[in-house]
Image (cartoon, rainbow, N blue to C red):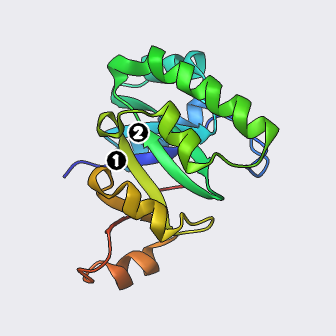
Amino acid sequence: MIKVDLHTHTIKSKSDASFIFSLEKVKEYVEKKEIDVIAITNHNLFDINNYNIIKDSLDILVLPGMEVDLENGHILVISDVLDSKEFEEKGKLISEIVNKKTSLSYEEFISIFTDLSKYILIPHYDKKPKIQERFIKKMAPFVSCGEVGNANKFSRMKNNENELTELVNSS
């Protein structure tokens, strides 16, 4: 079995509770939990230097990502390692927009991520702040799972074929 954590914060943003990033704690977490893959998904930013330090310090696959404020909900956007420079530019655009207002519009999101097929998209599905169903439907061909808030929600929803496949992350 492959163990994956696609929701890892390493830089505090205005959306986060206070924390101090520790590379040693990330290494300990990955080792203790036997994680095979993580994605760095800070709120509305992608810091390539932070990403590269983590990627170069771990012996596992580390994916570039962001947790984007979209239409007053959140969506994880995870990129290919080979596209990390391009992803950094998209992160700068998102940071600029979100610093001026609280959330991207769907149109702004699509204008930045023009080819959704290049990304893993994981909307907050049954987790606050939740993406509205109408936006999930617009992205449906590119969304294969949704993030839920805890293991109980995961257990309750996992056998409902009318729901997205659920994903529980550490954050």
Above or below 7: residue 37: above
In-front residue for pair 134/161: 134
Can residue 156 be seen by looking at this rendering?
Answer: yes
Counting residues from the N terminus, which is met first, the one under dot 2 or under dot 1? 1
Question: Residue 91, percent across and down?
Answer: 58, 28
Above or below 68: residue 99: above
Q: Secondary structure at mark 2?
A: strand
Question: Residue 27, percent across and down?
Answer: 49, 33
Q: Amino acid at mark 1?
A: Val
In-front residue for pair 112/123: 112
- Image quadrant for the C terminus? bottom right
Above or below 108: residue 33: below
Which residue shows up at 42% across the image and 46% down it? Answer: 6
In-front residue for pair 76/21: 76
Number of marks in the image? 2
On residue 38, which mark appears? 2
- Name the image quarter holding residue 43: top right
Q: Is residue 157 left or right of residue 71?
A: left
Q: Amino acid at mark 2?
A: Ile
Which residue shows up at 59% across the image and 51% down it? Answer: 70
On residue 4, which mark appears? 1
| Pointers 2 and 1 in contact (C-beta within 8 Å) | yes
Q: Secondary structure at mark 1?
A: strand
- Name the image quarter holding residue 160: bottom left
